[in-house]
Amino acid sequence: RILQVSSKVNSTWHPASSFSSSSVPSVKLFIDGKFIESKSDKWMDIHNPATNEVIGRVPQATKAEMDAAVSSCKRAFPAWADTSILSRQQVLLRYQQLIKENLKEIARLITLEQGKTLADAEGDVFRGLQVVEHACSVTSLMLGETMPSITKDMDLYSYRLPLGVCAGIAPFNFPAMIPLWMFPMAMVCGNTFLMKPSERVPGATILLAKLLQDSGAPDGTLNVIHGQHEAVNFICDHPDIKAISFVGSNQAGEYIFERGSRHGKRVQANMGAKNHGVVMPDANKENTLNQLVGAAFGAAGQRCMALSTAILVGEAKKWLPELVERAKKLRVNAGDQPGADLGPLITPQAKERVCNLIDSGTEEGASILLDGRDIKVKGYENGNFVGPTIISNVKPNMTCYKEEIFGPVLVVLETDTLDEAIKIVNDNPYGNGTAIFTTNGATARKYSHLVDVGQVGVNVPIPVPLPMFSFTGSRASFRGDTNFYGKQGIQFYTQLKTVTSQWKEEDASLSSPAVV
Ligand code: NAD
């Protein structure tokens, strides 16, 4: 029966798919099982980053609409929490199938709204799909613990219960993957969920909500609102919301962590990054240079795990000219164009910010070896493009090193020893990801052991853990104590209940000490 489930998302209900130059479609809210037009008088335009054309508009949901969304989640919670775990698992099993069937359609929408290449957009959906698949193993993940006979006739056992209404606030850079880190894990545990996608890329979340509904999730178990600060404050303050999952910048994350915590909620906040790739002279040169180029410039550097800083150790310094040659070969184009390696940045403001940070490099004494600031992309002259840029002679006190650039810019530092490289990485406040490139196992082990970063790659440039593990960014890249997905994700979305029970043997029916 499950294999027969089928649902195709298409332009008959999704606004951005029916875009034409004569009309500007609006993105719907998803409240109590219905896709509804907001009554808001505050709307924001959605732009195609490759052209800056307006492709849709998204509302800032009104207070009444946001209240209706939370009430819907609250009403749906008791029945959903009581639904057998096997039934919730079945919904997720159908969901993973529908996401697979509609992967290309979701990716197409991501490229339209976010700008990344179609291949990257498909990867975005695929990495989210893996979390949905993982959530299907809830029957093992939610197991509790038991300790029989802690004293005469007394047993101790624990089990996990959902929290109630949970909420998610997502960034623009992974429109499918990051919402899919959140609501499937929360819902399979029996919670209901209020999702607020990034106002710049709301389309993928709406498609994903439609597919979840088609998978059999009851009305009210997922609600989607749109907005910016008011929606965020609403989520942080609302007494019926028990937990908040946030992914985005430090500015927003610190704020949400503090405001949400002050209102007694659990908050997990994945935030910004400055990820270092340490290149040892004994590394496999060919592989390493390819990996560095892909990880620094892929997705136009708009990945929280982009390898945005290279530390060349010892003789590896000599590889810099070859690195530049490889970066020059990357093709910058609109994300839906064949052969594009990287697309535009999300907004003109993001482009300006990235260019200013490159400027600061020259002003503070670094050298620009490859300059993508003035790139022109034929046919897309109004897009927010920045070409691959490499800044060398960078020192840790420079602005381009201290700031998260979030663009296709690789800053390069040099050291004579591994120990100096480790010190630079550990002195940096962020702890999202890092990688070492070496063919020496002892060097790799020393680095992995001593580096104070939550996710380490050994000859792997973007070490994002698969969902049976958890996403374990650390230090300034994370606030909270329980990470996203994996066993930690289940912990975040559940409360343990521990029962100590005594059933005296002498009270057992129809038994006597002689029989026993
Ligand atoms: P952002 O912080 O601007 O936006 C994220 C969300 O917060 C959006 O839904 C937005 O509406 C809301 N928001 C924005 N500013 C706010 C404010 N001042 N107060 C309250 N809410 C606010 O982030 P972004 O630009 O969409 O995403 C890029 C950032 O996300 C980068 O810093 C990147 O490193 C980070 N990121 C981190 C991870 C991770 O797992 N560590 C993953 C992806 C992205």
Image: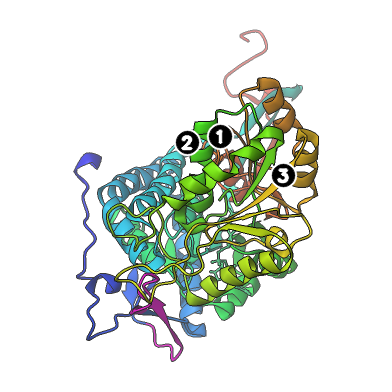
Q: Position of residue 4 (x, y in %)?
A: 19, 43
The answer to whether residue 494 is above or below residue 356 is above
Question: Looking at the image, which residue is at 59% across and 39% down?
Answer: 319
Left/right placement of residue 2 relative to residue 465 reads left
Q: Secondary structure at mark 2?
A: helix
Q: Estimate the x, y position of residue 140 in percent, counting from the top left.
A: 50, 33
Please give left or right for residue 120 compared with residue 187 in the image: left
Q: Quadrant of ligand 1?
A: bottom right
In the displayed structure image, the side of residue 143 where residue 221 appears, left or right: left
The type of residue carrying mark 3 is: Glu
Q: Which residue is mark 1?
A: 143
Task: Give the CA separation, mark 1 to mark 3.
Answer: 49 Å
Camera-side residue: 284 or 58?
Answer: 284
Specify whether tag 2 is near ligand 1 (CB below 8 Å). no
Mark sitting on residue 414:
3
What is the quadrant of the C terminus in the image? Answer: top right
Dot 1 or dot 3: first in sequence order is 1
* Residue 269 shows in this picture: yes
Distance between the alpha carbons at the discs numbered 2 and 3: 49 Å
Q: Which mark is residue 139?
A: 2
Pointers 2 and 1 in contact (CB under 8 A)? Answer: yes
The stretch in magenta equals 38-56
Residue 331, quarter of the rendered image: bottom left
Q: Residue at x 70, y 65 (%)?
A: 254
